[in-house]
Amino acid sequence: MTDLFHGIAETDLPRLLKCINARTVHYKKDELIIEEGSVATEFGIVVSGQARSIKWDLSGRLIILTFIEQNSVIGVMVAAREGHISPVSVQATTDSTITLISFERLLARCKGNCAGHEQLLRNYINAVADKGLELHERINCLLKPTVRDKILTFLQRTSKEQQSSSFTIPMNRNVMAEYLNVDRAALSRELSRMKKEGLIDYHKNWFYFE
């Protein structure tokens, strides 16, 4: 279950979701859930599937900002932002099902005294804080001066998130190069050097890093 519903009894969810006018939308792979520059007054929960937040730079190059897994939230910072203009696009990377919730409805006083409405608002604030920290870590990775530094920062964070020195990443080498904002050939060369030096081991999207 998503952290957005932490502390809310499962039996209370149907009534709560009805109170906040939650709706379910299905998206095809590669379809945009949120488009950069659009007004987004709803935030979403990924019920099934995966997505990513992306931008294009001035040269037209795709920049991957974050990957969004099942049970994660999307659009929580944009929905709470004045004007609700999204600075990024969110794209489904698989066929996905998203539960969308109106931010204004979340803030509105609950007429039905729904159990969990106030807890949901608290959880939303935590989700905004978590997204801010996630973006901070992402920027920290992008600002690293060398390809090796970027790889190490990314692997350290992923290992910590999965609480294991052996883990998989949700991307192939092309996507990994886009995510780290480095040349694909340079990424492959540096990974090979690091493996020969015994710093890491890997096979396809499996990595061992300690």
Image (cartoon, rainbow, N blue to C red):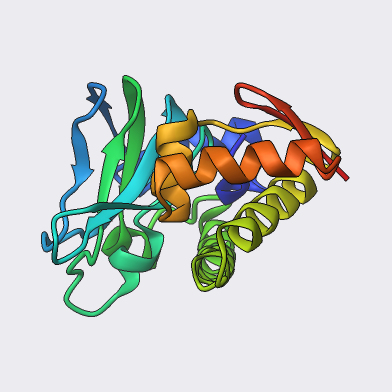
Q: Is residue 13 visible?
A: yes
Residue drawn at (43%, 53%) of the image: 182
User: Which image quadrant for residue 60?
Assistant: bottom left
Of residues 185 and 57, the one drawn nearer to the viewer in this rendering: 185
Nearer to us in this view, 131 or 200: 200
Q: Give the side of residue 68 with respect to residue 107, left or right.
A: right
Residue 98 on image: x %, y %:
34, 33
Q: Residue at x 88, y 45 (%)?
A: 210
Q: Above or below — where is 127 with respect to 18?
A: below
Residue 141 falls in image quadrant: bottom right
In percent of the image, x 61 and y 26: which residue is there?
205
Q: Is residue 37 above or below residue 14?
A: below
Residue at the extreme bottom of the image, as rendered: 82
Give the percent coordinates (x, y) of residue 5. Answer: 59, 46
* Position in image of residue 195 (x %, y %): 76, 36
Indicate left or right for 16 with 89 as reference: right
Q: Pinpoint residue 154: horizontal percent, then vertical percent.
A: 63, 53
State the quadrant of the N terminus: top right
Number of dots carrying numbers: 0
- Position of residue 171 in the picture relative to residue 18 (left or right): right
Q: Nearer the viewer, residue 125 or 189?
A: 189
In percent of the image, x 40 and y 34: which residue is there? 174
